[in-house]
Image (tube, helix red, strand yellow):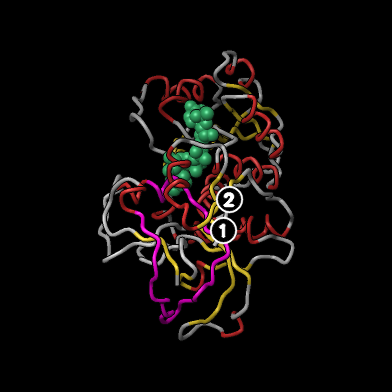
């Protein structure tokens, strides 16, 4: 099969090579997926760069997210799954066969059935962003009737959070930094979209009764989050780019809020699978739509990684 691989960490152009590779065989409890699309996330790019220290098992085919068709199954997996259209998650987690290839092997449950109404393109955008968003929104309490703030509502996780929060019955406020991102967040369904670079964000958000914040940049936004907080509010912090925050203990104490930190790879298993199930239910209900994407071929993978590193508003999807 054709696959993109790296054998050492480095820049995309230095270490990513597209060449022939043996098709993997599904082991017990695994499925072989013929991929249609491979989705790229910041975590894939950080893994390839070496920013997240890890051991490479001889080689690594990158990317957790993808979509395709189950071609064969390993021992213990229902053979009726062969031919099923699936969305794939966490393919490169502890596994050298990520989705930037014609085939990948993943554990059975990491290949989730796609409803007939959902395209393979949308399926490849779900994994990391949608499951993270679902976890941050639904892991501890229902949000129906609540008002949620999603910081960065035009980002991959942020846009998924806007859509899932709406699907979950919440009112959604979100922050963005440009007119283009305002359009993306508005089209995703946000009720209130605030440009946080223009000043006045506190005034626009403080009387909205926000009970939960899905936070992409706690360091930059802690002051804003505290200024609009009410006792009992919860902040879910899922990203760690840039400087660590300095915590103002007195202000935090007075606010009586909770800050929870999460990373998808380490959350409690039952909460992880509950988040996956929320994504599946939202898909069946038509609650998730296609984000802005740019399509590239497998051979253009290095440029696609650079696109992610440049902070593009378009998700990069490899058309396999
Ligand atoms: N913990 C986990 O399991 C997990 C899962 C998924 C992703 N992540 C991490 O989360 C981060 C975002 O991932 P992504 O895929 O959503 O990236 P993305 O598509 O690039 O989106 C990030 C968004 O955050 C916005 N942003 C940055 N600073 C902001 C601020 N101060 N206020 C409001 N918005 C701000 C950016 O827009 P502007 O800069 O223009 O505002 C951008 O739209 C990455 O660091 C990723 O590694 C972690």
The yes-or-no answer for disc 1 within 8 Å of ligand 1 is no
- Relative to the observer, which residue lies in front, 94 or 97? 97
Find residue 295 and name its label. Answer: 2
Q: Residue 89, labelled with which disc?
A: none
34 lies above or below 189: below
Q: Quadrant of residue 281?
A: bottom right
Residue at 57%, 54% (x, y): give it.
126
Tell me if residue 292 comes above or below residue 301 in the rendering. above
* Disc 1 target residue: 319
Task: Give the quarter of the figure containing the C terminus.
Answer: bottom right
Q: In this view, does 190 lie to the left or right of 42?
A: right
Question: Mark 1 or mark 2, which has the lower sequence index?
Answer: 2
Q: Callout 1: few (<14), some (14-19), or many (20+) C-alpha neighbours within 10 Å?
A: many
- Above or below residue 13? Residue 69 is below
Q: Distance between the residues labelled 1 and 2?
A: 6 Å
Residue stretch rendered in magenta on the structure? 16-45
């Amino acid at each position: 099969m054709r696959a993109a691989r790296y054998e050492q960490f480095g820049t995309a152009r230095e270490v990513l090579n597209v060449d022939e590779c043996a098709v993997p065989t599904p082991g017990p409890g695994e499925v072989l997926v013929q991929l249609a699309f491979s989705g790229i996330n910041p975590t894939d790019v950080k893994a390839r760069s070496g920013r997240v220290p890890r051991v490479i098992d001889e080689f690594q085919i990158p990317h957790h997210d993808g979509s395709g068709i189950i071609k064969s199954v390993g021992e213990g997996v229902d053979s009726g799954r062969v031919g099923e259209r699936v969305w794939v998650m966490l393919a490169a987690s502890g596994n050298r066969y990520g989705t930037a290839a014609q085939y990948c092997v993943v554990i059975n449950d990491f290949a989730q059935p796609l409803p007939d109404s959902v395209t393979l393109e949308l399926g490849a955008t779900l994994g990391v962003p949608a499951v993270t968003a679902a976890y941050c929104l639904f892991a501890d309490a229902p949000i129906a009737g609540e008002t949620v703030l999603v910081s960065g509502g035009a980002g991959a996780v942020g846009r998924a959070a806007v859509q899932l929060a709406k699907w979950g019955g919440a009112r959604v406020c979100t922050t963005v930094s440009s007119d283009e991102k305002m359009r993306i967040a508005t089209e995703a369904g946000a009720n209130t979209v605030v440009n946080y670079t223009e000043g006045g964000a506190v005034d626009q958000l403080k009387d909205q009764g926000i009970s939960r914040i899905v936070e992409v940049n706690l360091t930059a936004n802690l002051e804003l989050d505290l200024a609009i907080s009410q006792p009992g509010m919860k902040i879910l912090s899922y990203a760690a780019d840039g400087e660590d925050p300095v915590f103002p203990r007195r202000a935090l104490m007075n606010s009586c809020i909770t800050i929870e930190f999460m990373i998808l790879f380490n959350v409690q298993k039952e909460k992880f699978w509950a988040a996956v199930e929320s994504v599946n239910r939202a898909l069946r209900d038509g609650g998730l739509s296609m984000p802005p994407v740019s399509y590239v071929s497998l051979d253009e993978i290095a440029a696609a990684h650079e696109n992610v590193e440049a902070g593009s508003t378009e998700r990069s999807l490899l058309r396999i």
